[in-house]
Image (cartoon, grey):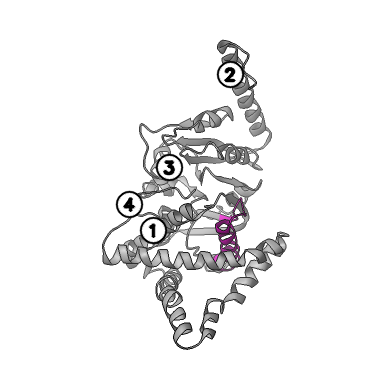
């Protein structure tokens, strides 16, 4: 029996109304007790009832309080909107489903009146001081975006474990180098703070590629602006838990990267360090993937099985930054036991990227349909 099963509808409605009112009052009091910052949070959401409450509550617990939290309920068929309303945040609904995260974010853009805009995915929670860390990085007026460290919220399945190692390595090693040269490759779409003026100047999140966060970041560099990576600003997204959803996400990322290189290649030539990063990534994702998927197994069969060591020859480079970060988090065994999963994910990622490369450049079949990765 539910708590309202034995009560008349009118009484149930009154009690629900009281509960919503009490939640709104409590959240308002919490915001009043904390330091306010000129930030509007936008959360695009489509059928996120299972996780949206965790996301909103993590925003309400931030050490710096945003002026407003707006959830864009993009045509959900579950009770996403009702959950968010009960937590005391604003909910807006487009006339029809926009078809993508970028479309939902753009729908909210003209309602933002604050100097800064925080974009966060509906399945992503934040460490209590994450917003404050990003906000403090925006002191330089040339900085138009800042992003943080990403760690999977759940680390259980093979695919979640593979992504866990991938993130620990990438954000501890590659992203730190990019920050040193003031050129983070991407201001992560799951959690980034922007100057609202910049978003308005570029008409928000572009729909011309499948990787709008990469497009927005590279556009900033070509305009002479800066983007920051703040490793102490930590977020926890829910990553794909099975092959079905992981394939969707990797497919979208691969096509998005290729689309952005085609779109921005002339501008990239004028940004030296970014140009170098992208060239290395293109080589690694294409030539290295072909070698990884074809040359190594052929040589192992026709010449010597020792060529199979090619699959793990770079293992020390993977292990060092991964285990250093894992040790600092008290997660050494979790990281070490997840390495095999990362090796599997890397093979799958290589195959999906080559497929995307063939479709985009040879078949001229550009991916235009946005599919959720969880």
First in sequence: mark 2 vs mark 1: 2
Residue 6 appears left or right of 140:
right
Circle 2: is it few (<14), some (14-19), or many (20+) Cα within 10 Å? few
Residue displayed at 69% across by 33% down: 33
Q: For the magenta stretch, what is the residue range?
A: 148-175
The quadrant in which residue 315 appears is bottom right
Where is mark 4, residue-wise? 368
First in sequence: mark 2 vs mark 3: 2
User: 74 and 162: which one is in front?
Assistant: 162
Q: CA distance from mark 3 to mark 4?
A: 17 Å
Which quadrant is home to the N terminus?
top right
Q: CA distance from mark 1 to mark 4?
A: 10 Å
Where is mark 1, residue-wise? 256
Where is mark 2, residue-wise? 17
- Report helix, strand or loop for mark 2: helix
Residue 100 in picture, x, y percent from top left = 39, 45
- Report helix, strand or loop for mark 1: helix
Q: Tell me, yes or no, whether the two marked residues, 2 and 1, touch with CB atoms within 8 Å.
A: no
- Report helix, strand or loop for mark 3: helix
First in sequence: mark 4 vs mark 2: 2
Where is mark 3, residue-wise? 105
Q: Residue furthest front?
A: 301
Q: Tell me, yes or no, whether the two marked residues, 1 and 4, touch with CB atoms within 8 Å.
A: no
Task: Say whether residue 39 is magenta.
Answer: no
Q: CA distance from mark 4 to mark 2?
A: 42 Å
- Report helix, strand or loop for mark 4: loop
Residue 107 in picture, x, y percent from top left = 39, 38
Residue displayed at 26% across by 63% down: 363
Residue 56 in picture, x, y percent from top left = 58, 38
């Amino acid at each position: 029996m539910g708590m309202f099963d034995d009560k008349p509808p009118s009484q149930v409605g009154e009690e629900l109304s009281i509960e919503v009112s009490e939640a709104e009052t409590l959240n308002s009091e919490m915001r009043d007790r904390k330091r306010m910052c000129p930030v509007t949070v936008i959360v695009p959401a489509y059928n996120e009832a299972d996780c949206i409450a965790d996301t909103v509550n993590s925003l309400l617990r931030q050490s710096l309080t945003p002026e407003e939290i707006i959830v864009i309920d993009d045509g959900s068929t579950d009770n996403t909107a009702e959950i968010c309303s009960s937590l005391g945040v604003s909910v807006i609904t487009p006339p029809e489903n926009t078809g993508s995260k970028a479309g939902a974010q753009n729908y909210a853009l003209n309602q933002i009146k604050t100097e800064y805009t925080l974009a966060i995915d509906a399945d992503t929670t934040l460490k209590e001081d994450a917003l404050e860390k990003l906000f403090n990085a925006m002191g330089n007026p040339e900085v138009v975006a800042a992003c943080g460290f990403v760690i999977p919220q759940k680390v259980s399945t093979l695919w979640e474990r593979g992504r866990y190692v991938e993130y620990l390595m990438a954000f501890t090693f590659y992203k730190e180098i990019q920050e040193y040269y003031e050129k983070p490759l991407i201001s992560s779409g799951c959690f980034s703070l922007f100057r609202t003026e910049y978003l308005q100047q570029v008409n928000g999140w572009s729909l011309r590629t499948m990787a709008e966060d990469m497009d927005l970041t590279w556009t900033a560099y070509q305009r002479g602006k800066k983007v920051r990576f703040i490793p102490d600003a930590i977020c926890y997204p829910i990553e794909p838990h099975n092959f079905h959803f992981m394939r969707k996400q990797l497919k979208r990322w691969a096509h998005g990267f290729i689309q952005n290189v085609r779109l921005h290649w002339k501008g990239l030539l004028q940004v030296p360090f970014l140009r170098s990063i992208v060239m290395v990534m293109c080589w690694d994702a294409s030539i290295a993937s072909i070698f990884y998927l074809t040359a190594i197994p052929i040589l192992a069969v026709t010449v010597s099985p020792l060529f199979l060591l090619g699959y793990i020859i770079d293992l020390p480079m993977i292990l060092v930054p991964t285990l250093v970060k894992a040790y600092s988090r008290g997660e050494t065994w979790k990281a070490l036991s997840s390495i095999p999963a990362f090796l599997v994910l890397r093979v799958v990622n290589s195959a999906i990227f080559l497929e995307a490369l063939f479709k985009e450049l040879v078949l001229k079949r550009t991916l235009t349909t946005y599919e959720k990765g969880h």
